[in-house]
Image (cartoon, grey):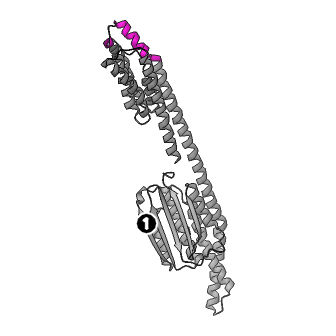
Amino acid sequence: MGKGRFEVRAGVRDWVIAVGVAAALLVTGLSEQHSATGLALLGYALLAAGGLALAAGRRAPVAVLVVTGLCAVGYQAAGFDVAAVAFLFAVYAAMRAGHRIITVAVSVAVLAALPVAALASGPHDTAEAFAQARGALEIAWLIAAGAAGEALRQAERRADEAERTREETARRRADDERLRIARELHDSLTHQISVIKVQAEVAVHVARKRGEQVPEALLAIQQAGREATRELRATLEALRDDDTAPPRGLDHVPELVEGARSIGLDATLTIEGQRQDVPVTVGRTVYRIVQESLTNVSRHADARTASVRIDCRPDSLAVRIDDDGKATPDPAPVPGVGLLGMRERVTALGGRLRAEPRSEGGFTVQAELPLERAS
């Protein structure tokens, strides 16, 4: 929406400039008190057309450059000794857009055509014609307009490059920090959790082999060790999941649903709309939302069914995961790390997330992600 407002303001500004230049040219032309002949009317029309053409300078700078140049030559030939102000604006716009060679070529052609047009406008000698042409388009003005456009183009290019460099530096630092955290977690926790898990499983195996009753606490330690191993592995994979690895997105959501079915959950998936128009960042976020939601359903919800619905709209993508678990509206659950992570991912893309128990029982997670901001 911000980009749309910017384009509207820029368009209004272009029209204000165009109307102002056209009005200035017409006032200057009217001050010369031409007789109301067909040639004079054509000159007035060319003055107005040259100014109003500037409204399209942002979208078609080369076309506006040619049109304003032809108008300047045309009203000079019609006998109007009016400066080619609109052409100078067009030169500035074309140079700012990066069309340097064609701008120089058109400018040389206009400079050459103006004395000819002055000669055609009336009984002038060659010196008077060149003087009138020089008054209509001073070479110094032309160079100044072109230099200003080129200087602004270079400044904008440097600003864009600096912004891109800052973003790349920040992304690289974030990737390095993420990998450092992954290494720290791997080095500090993986070994200890593996020892706990192996020792607990050995103890359970020995107790069963001897025919002894396995203590509930030992079984709980065994199960907790397995869960901690899976959680740590998933965390390390998430931390190491950067842009250099194949991103997980919408095409991988069916794998999540199949995985949920393999553990006994009756999970369904519905995807509507055009998936090829979804940005990678949005697809990755949807994958993580579905992954976290189905993980919570299988571990904590005591649910029998779960449904995943993804709706790819022209300007946004909506995802909804519902289950029939034991969650109830009262009391409201305290958000865990998984839900907080989901909310952070959605908020970073400018979207909205709603995660709460359903009135009919069970839990729902709904997210809406804009596509324009993420593209």
Helix, strand, or loop for circle 1? Answer: strand
Question: What residue occupies the far front of the structure in this picture?
Answer: 36
Give how far across and how far down residue 171 sits, in percent: 57, 50
Q: Is residue 313 left or right of residue 359?
A: left
Please say whether residue 51 is one of the residues in the magenta stretch. Answer: no
The part of the image, by quadrant, that contains residue 238 is bottom right
Residue range highlighted in magenta: 119-140
Is residue 40 visible from the viewing direction of this image?
Answer: yes
Residue under the image location 58 percent in, 74 percent down = 359
Q: Residue at x 44, y 35 (%)?
A: 58
Give the residue pinned by disc 1: 271
User: Which kind of residue does numbered mark 1 sit on?
Assistant: Ile
Q: Main secondary structure of the magenta part?
A: helix
Query: Which one is nearer the viewer's eye here, 9 or 226?
Result: 9
> Taking 182 as reference, is 7 left or right?
left
Residue 275, relative to residue 85: is it above or below? below
Q: Which quadrant of the figure has residue 46?
A: top left
Residue 187 spot, x, y in % from top left? 64, 64
Residue sitting farthest toward the bottom: 211
- Please give the count of numbered marks on the rendered protein: 1
Residue located at (52% from left, 80% from top)? 304
Quarter of the image for residue 202 reads: bottom right
User: On the picture, is 304 further left or further right than 59?
Assistant: right
The percent coordinates of residue 162 (x first, y second) are 56, 39
The structure residue drawn at horizontal position 48% and vertical position 32%, both measured from the top left corner, is: 16
Q: Position of residue 179 (x, y in %)?
A: 60, 57
Asked if residue 131 lies in the magenta stretch, the reply is yes
Decide which of 181, 302 is in the foreground and name it: 302
Which of the pair 146/310 is nearer the observer?
Answer: 310
